[in-house]
Structure formats: C-alpha cells, structure tokens
Image (spheres, coloured by chain):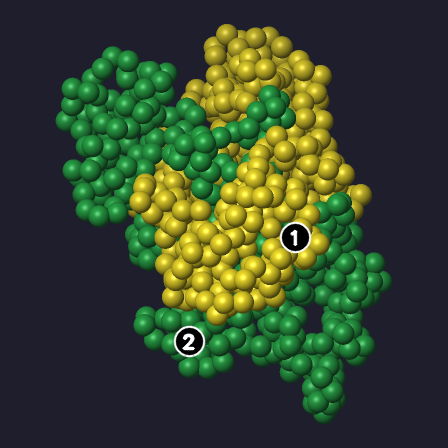
C-alpha cells in the first residue's frame, strides 16, 4: 500500500480530522489516536446507541457507531499531556513517526509542547497537518469549529432554500467537516509525495472555512465580479430544465429528473406518451425550457405523481434520461449500485459484533483501500505502543498508569 | 498530467494538483469546456474567456484543443499520454468506451499511466452507463432526504457540490496512486463516483441520528431533533439569520447568561437539552427569538465572543468576500487575465511552508498553448498545425 511503513499520530477530534487519520490507515499507515480518559473525543460521548431496537451492553464510550466510522483502523493510547512524563512519551513517539494530525484550537498543540517547531526538533522530516476552523492566524483564529457555524459563516447555509427570499439551510449535513477531510487529504498526501522525493518535512495550515469557500467558487465569484448575492435556487439548475425533485405515487416518495440536451427532452416527452403540454414548440430547445421552467415543472410533477418511483426511474434511465430515486439513508445501504461498489464493509467490533463501515470512496484497481477493523477501545494499544514501540518495561508502564500519566 | 475534463469535477481535480506544482495539460474540445459558457461574467457580459467558473477551475493549466472523436485527434492525445504520469477525465463511460479511451484500453497501451475517471456513478455497477448529473448523486446518496421542509419536496445541494467533492477526492486519490506507482505498483485505475462520495458523507453523519433515537430526515431550518441537544437551528435576528448550536451544557448556560438569565431559563422544562431538542424545540425557539430580533448578526457575534458560546452569522457572499479575516490571510488572490488584466478569485485553502507554490497563474484561453504543445513539445510543423485547424482537429 502507498503508506505502508508510515506512522501517524492523530490528536484530532470529532469528524474532519479523525477521518483523515482513518483514510491514512486505509492507505497502509499505522495510525495512533492519542486519547486521554478524562478528556475524550466528543464522538465517544454521544450516549448509548439503540441498534435494531436494542441497547448494546458495555461502556457507552465504546459503543458509538459514529466514533467507529470516524476512527476505524486506528490504534488507541491514553496519555495525559499535562503531565511532564506524558509530554516526554509523546515526544519519543514523534521521533519515530512521520505525520501528525490535529484539528484543535490554534495554540493548543503549542501549549502541550507540540508545536511544529517542537516536533521538527524531534523529527526533522515530520509532516504536521493543522486543520482548525479558520486557520492558525487572523482575527477569527479562535473560532469554534462546529460545522454549521462554518457553513453559515462561509455563506453555504444561505444558498439553500426554495425561493430566492427564503434560506432554509442544510443543518443536518455537517458538510464543512467531510469537505475539510477531502481537502486535508490532498494537502497531506502532497506533502508525503514531496517528502519522498526531497526528504523535507512540511507544516500545513489548513483552514476549514477556506476549504469550504474553495468549493463555493461560483457564488463567491458572483460577489467578487458583480457585487451580487446568489440567492437560493430551489432545485432548479442554471442550464438544465427540467431539473428537480418530483413527487411520485405514494406518500413522501420522490424522484430526481434532469434534462440537459434537446435529445434528452424529446426522449422524456416520448416516455410520457407525448402529452399535449409537452409538445409546445417553445419547449423544444434549451433556452425555451429554461424560460418556462416553472410551467414545465408543474406539468412534469403532475405526471410523476401518477408513477411508482422505482418503475419510473427504470423506465427513464433505460432510454437515457437522468433519473434517480430520492433515497432514505436506510435505502442507500442496500441500493444495488452501492452494493456493487462495496462502499461499506463489514467488520467485527468486540462489543457491537458485526457492523458496517464506509471505506474511503475511491476505487483503485491495484491498491484498493479497505476497512479492516472498527475503532479501537480506549487505550487498547497502550502495551504495544509503550512497551514494543518505545521500549518501556511493563513494570514502568504500570507505574505510569498508577501515576496518571498513562490514563 | 493530462486532463480531458469538462465543467467541474475533473477540472477541480486538475486545479488542486496544478496548484501543488503539477504541469496540467487541459484538453478541450474545439467548442470549449462547458464551464466557459457558465459565468459568472464580469459586468454580465458573456465571453468564453471571462467565465468565472472556468477561470477558477482552470488556473495554471496548459490549454490545448483537440477533437478526440477524430482519429488524428485521438493520436495526438495518445502522444500526450505517452509522456504523462496521470490522465484524468470526467466524460461518461459509454463515450470513453466508444472512443477507446476507457481504462482497460489505455492500461494496455500505457501500463505506467494512472487513469482517473470522475463520474456520477463510477465505472462499475448497474448505473455506470446511465446518463447522470450532480442531482442524481444528491438523490441516491440520501443527501436530499435530509434537506428541506418536511412538508415540501427535498432539496438538492447548491452549486454543483457533488462534482466539487468528487473532484477533491479524485485529487487525493490521484496522489495516493502516484505514491503507489513509485512503490512499484505501476499504473492503475482510480475510479471516483460522486454518488459514492456523498453516500459516504451522509452515511457517516446520519449515524449520530439514526442510532441515537432520531431520524435522518428533513426538518426545515433545524437539524432533525436538533441532532441531540438543543439548539441546532437557523433563526432570524435583526438583520438576517444566525445559526445557534450548543453541543454541551456549559455552552447553553453561557447563552442563557448572555440573554440576561430570563426567568424561563430556571424552569425545569428548559434544563434537559436532549428533551428540548427532540420534543419541543419550537417552544424554546419562541423564547429565544425576541432576544435575537433585538440584535444584529454583528452584535450577536460580539456577545457570543464575550460569553464564549458558538454562534454563526449566515453571511451573504458579498459579506464573505470582504471579511477582514480572509483579507488578513490573503485568501482571495489576483489571477492574471489576458483581457481584464486580472480577476480576483478564491485561493488555496491551505498554506504550506515556503516550499510550495500558491499562485498558479492564468487559466488558458481556448487553444492558447496549441503551438507550444503540438509544435514545440510534440514536434509538429506550423504547416501541420494549420491543417489540423482546417480539419477541425484543433
């Protein structure tokens, strides 16, 4: 695998940072999550889950599916960074590691003697990735990294809504987090590539806010070029019509349909059985369809309402019109397309038993990243890391545990 | 790297790698990338050399035109590929197969080449040959299901987000494949599907809902059941909207203190954040909204900083582009432009130490580097260049 032989220390929390660590583990790296029993990753503290109507046995911090997803394939050690011996142990680990990841508030790593300058003294070619909410400097550097705060700040929440006057946002999604993960992976893998060629380490200051803005270029450019705010567009598209989510027969059942070319439109009209409304000459070209988008949407919705979702999708996709079912997440799990591409993999957790975790959404024909283990139990790898990697004798590990250093 | 890309996904992949120092050859059909027709255009004057989306996505690339549906065009593409490390494309699988530009065919000819396809459904599975756009990825991933008003139709993600996410993942996976090649694995296929990417995002975040007594479903301006503890909602204030989110008890207590400890806050009904979030969030909204309506977003941000609780003003884009924080970090950069002098565009989301370039230069005009690439680099004569133009190959 591309990162076999790499060791990663992961100081990050919640989703954006931990998921970077899990992907690096899928790519072959040994990833050690640095934990502390008294200050746990919030994701361990989501409470006891209910799975298939049952509440599983065991300490609740070990049972959270979300934590398992965002920390799979890692090792866990517990260490008190406020204790001088704790710092000493982490410094020893840094000296035998390649990459350090953190998404804490700026200054936190430095307060624990883990600033890039400290790390570089211990390991000159270390790669350090910092991914705070707004970056390591600037007036907003201390901003809290809750995803919806970022997506509000970056303007995303204002872009989602039914009509131009009404923003509704997309708070369920936590979109800023996985977006930050994707961009952080680009940066950290680029640093690895450079290090392989030149032997140089790197420090990366990634701003999660700026990573979000990087994918909102279109409305930002409207503001930069024309001093204009982009309003919510509902489900309409700037150059496709019809384009939307339409109701199907049954309750709360929906289909997406999108038409770009005139050929696709004619195919859709045939599929509908050439209704009179659709034969208007002004609908025959793209410009006309864009100008009459609302009328087309109304007619189309009246037709889709009479159709069963899955049959309609099959009918349209067979003839070359873009159509998809709007799936619930439970339907997504068993959607044939995703099953065929194995986007989830089954692993065994010591307390939950069988569970499905998503692997990184890449298909590589030779070096396919895979999920092999669920998340580690808290401190599961203390013995391996402190005894085998750092060469402490087991008696000393016990002493450090009783002194609250390994805790 | 050779990018035979169009519109957003493959071009975004190319942009990210160009900014990290890759030499990216962008191959456009002679009619041009569709993003050239998209805009936004400065002053609303549509010009294929002035489309903001195109200029942003293609900064720093070498631009050539080629009609690869013609034999001669395809031969020239192959000559480019023979010198390339990476080929990235987002044209549909059926089109690539018809032209003999699918992975299997390319791998046979160029065993060390990394072939990256970025599509909506990917190159395998029952939907791999379907016509599809971003909206299909939004629909099947479960993203739409949780965006919008429960009484109305689900909403899609704005501004081609599925394509941007697929492009970012393609860039990361491409570097991973290059690292693997350097370890002796040879070339391989990197198959990125926007639907897989969004399904993974949804599949991850939905875990905090569905296994903790809540649903992954649309709930208007709120996360469903407040995603656990109250609040987790967008509410109006004096001059716009703000996001309120408290994930911990102490944050809620600070918020209530900032409001001046209203009487209701000591009522037992407003102590259990989980119950408030799940069972009667609208009731609590109604108690907070009069206070919000007396303050502007800027005032609320100031209060939140003073009392140390999180709040997110919902910015308009004209506010984002002028924000002092982004100015101090130099996030927006001047990109040279052949007609306009320069344009201001979003920059890189990460700062490396001084060893990485960050200003990639202008986007290519249509066919700008045809002479450079076809004559100087591939050795064609000017006469051949003219013939290629007359034949519509370039």
Separation of disc 2 and disc 1 at Cα?
40 Å
Question: Where's residue B12, x and y in %?
Answer: 56, 35
Instruction: State the SS at label 2.
Output: loop
Question: Where's residue A79, x and y in %?
Answer: 69, 76
Q: Residue B304 carries which label?
A: 1
Q: Is residue A241 visible?
A: yes
Question: Where's residue B209, x and y in %?
Answer: 42, 61
Instruction: State the SS at label 1.
Output: helix
Residue on which the image places disc 2: A352
State the hue of chain A. Answer: green
Residue that appears at 74% across and 87% down: A403
State the hue of chain B. Answer: yellow
Looking at the rendered image, the disc whose residue lies closer to the viewer, 2 or 1, is: 1
Which residue reaches farthest front?
B263
Q: Give the class, few, some or many, for how many residues have Cα within 10 Å of label 2's Cα (few <14, many ≥20).
A: some
Q: Is residue B281 above or below residue B298?
A: below
Left or right position of A372 against B180: left
Front residue (pair A295, B40): A295
Front residue (pair A148, A352): A148
Left or right position of A166 against B256: left
Residue that appears at 70% across and 20% down: B342
Question: Where's residue B91, x and y in %?
Answer: 43, 32
> In the picture, residue B278 is in which quadrant?
bottom left
Left or right position of B82 against A233: right
- Report in which chain the residue with disc 2 lies: A
Residue that appears at 36% across and 20% down: A290
Numbered marks: total: 2
Residue that appears at 72% across and 76% down: A80
Q: Can residue B162 be seen in this view?
A: no
Q: Give the class, few, some or many, for how many residues have Cα within 10 Å of label 1's Cα (few <14, many ≥20).
A: some
């Amino acid at each position: 695998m591309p990162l076999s032989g790499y060791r990663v220390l992961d100081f990050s929390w919640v989703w954006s940072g931990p998921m970077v660590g899990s992907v690096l583990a899928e790519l072959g790296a040994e990833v050690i999550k640095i934990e502390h029993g008294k200050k746990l990753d919030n994701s361990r503290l989501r409470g006891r889950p209910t799975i298939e109507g049952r509440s599983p046995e065991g300490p609740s911090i070990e049972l959270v599916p979300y934590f398992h997803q965002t920390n799979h394939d890692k090792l866990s050690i517990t260490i008190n960074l406020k204790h001088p011996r704790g710092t000493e142990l982490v410094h020893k680990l840094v000296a035998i590691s390649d990459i350090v990841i953190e998404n804490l508030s700026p200054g936190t790593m430095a307060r624990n003697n883990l600033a890039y300058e400290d790390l570089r003294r211990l390991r000159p070619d270390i790669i350090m990735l910092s991914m705070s909410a707004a970056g390591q400097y600037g007036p907003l550097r201390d901003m809290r990294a809750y995803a919806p705060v970022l997506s509000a700040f970056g303007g995303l929440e204002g872009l989602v809504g039914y009509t131009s006057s009404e923003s509704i946002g997309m708070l369920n999604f936590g979109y800023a987090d996985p977006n930050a993960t994707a961009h952080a992976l680009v940066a950290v893998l680029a640093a690895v590539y450079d290090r392989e060629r030149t032997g140089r380490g790197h420090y990366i200051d990634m701003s999660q806010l700026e990573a979000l803005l990087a994918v909102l270029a279109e409305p930002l450019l409207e503001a930069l070029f024309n001093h204009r705010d982009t309003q919510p567009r509902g489900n309409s598209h700037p150059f496709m019509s019809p384009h939307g989510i339409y109701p199907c027969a049954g309750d709360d059942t929906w289909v997406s349909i999108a038409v770009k070319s005139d050929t696709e439109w004619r195919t859709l009209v045939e599929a509908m059985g050439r209704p009179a409304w659709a034969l208007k000459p002004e609908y025959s070209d793209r410009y006309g369809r864009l100008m009459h988008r609302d009328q087309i949407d109304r007619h189309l919705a009246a037709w889709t309402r009479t159709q069963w979702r899955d049959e309609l999708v099959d009918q349209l996709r067979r003839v070359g019109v873009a159509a998809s079912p709007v799936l619930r997440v439970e339907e997504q799990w068993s959607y044939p397309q995703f099953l065929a591409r194995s986007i989830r993999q089954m692993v065994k957790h010591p307390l939950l038993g069988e569970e499905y975790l998503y692997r990184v959404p890449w298909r590589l024909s030779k070096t396919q990243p895979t999920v092999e283990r669920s998340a580690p139990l808290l401190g599961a790898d203390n013995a391996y890391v402190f005894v085998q990697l750092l060469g402490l004798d087991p008696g000393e590990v016990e002493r450090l545990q009783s002194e609250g250093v390994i805790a | 790297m050779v990018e035979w890309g169009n519109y957003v996904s493959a071009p975004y992949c190319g942009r990210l790698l160009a900014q990290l120092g890759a030499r990216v050859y962008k191959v456009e059909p002679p009619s041009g990338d569709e993003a050239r027709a998209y805009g936004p255009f400065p002053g609303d004057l549509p010009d294929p050399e002035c489309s903001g989306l195109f200029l942003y996505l293609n900064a720093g690339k070498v631009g050539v035109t080629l009609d690869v549906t013609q034999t001669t065009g395809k031969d020239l593409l192959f000559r480019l590929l023979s010198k390339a490390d990476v080929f990235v494309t987002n044209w549909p699988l059926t089109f690539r197969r018809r032209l003999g530009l699918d992975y299997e065919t390319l791998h046979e000819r160029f065993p060390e080449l990394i072939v990256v396809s970025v599509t909506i459904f990917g190159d395998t599975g029952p939907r791999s040959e379907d016509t599809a756009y971003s909206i299909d990825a939004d629909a099947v991933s479960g993203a739409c299901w949780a965006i919008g008003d429960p009484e109305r139709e689900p909403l899609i993600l704005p501004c081609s987000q599925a394509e941007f996410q697929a492009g970012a993942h393609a860039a990361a996976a491409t570097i991973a494949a290059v690292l693997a090649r350097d370890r002796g694995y040879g070339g391989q296929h990197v198959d990125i599907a926007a639907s897989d990417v969004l399904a993974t995002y949804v599949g991850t975040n939905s875990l905090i809902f569905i296994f903790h007594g809540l649903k992954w479903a649309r709930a208007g301006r709120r996360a469903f059941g407040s995603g656990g503890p109250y609040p987790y909602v967008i509410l109006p204030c004096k001059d716009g909207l703000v996001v309120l989110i408290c994930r911990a008890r102490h944050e809620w207590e600070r918020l209530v203190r900032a409001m001046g400890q209203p009487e209701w806050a000591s009522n037992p009904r407003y102590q259990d954040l989980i119950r408030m979030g799940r069972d009667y969030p609208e009731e609590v909204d109604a108690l907070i909204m009069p206070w919000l309506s007396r303050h502007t977003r800027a005032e609320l941000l100031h209060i939140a900083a003073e009392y140390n609780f999180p709040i997110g003003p919902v910015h308009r884009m004209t506010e984002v582009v002028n924000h002092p924080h982004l100015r101090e970090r130099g996030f927006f950069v001047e990109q040279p432009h052949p007609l306009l002098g320069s344009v201001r565009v979003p920059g890189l989301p990460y700062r490396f130490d001084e060893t990485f370039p960050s200003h990639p230069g202008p986007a290519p005009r249509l066919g700008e580097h045809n002479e450079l690439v076809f004559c100087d680099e591939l050795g064609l004569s000017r006469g051949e260049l003219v013939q290629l133009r007359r034949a519509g190959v370039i």
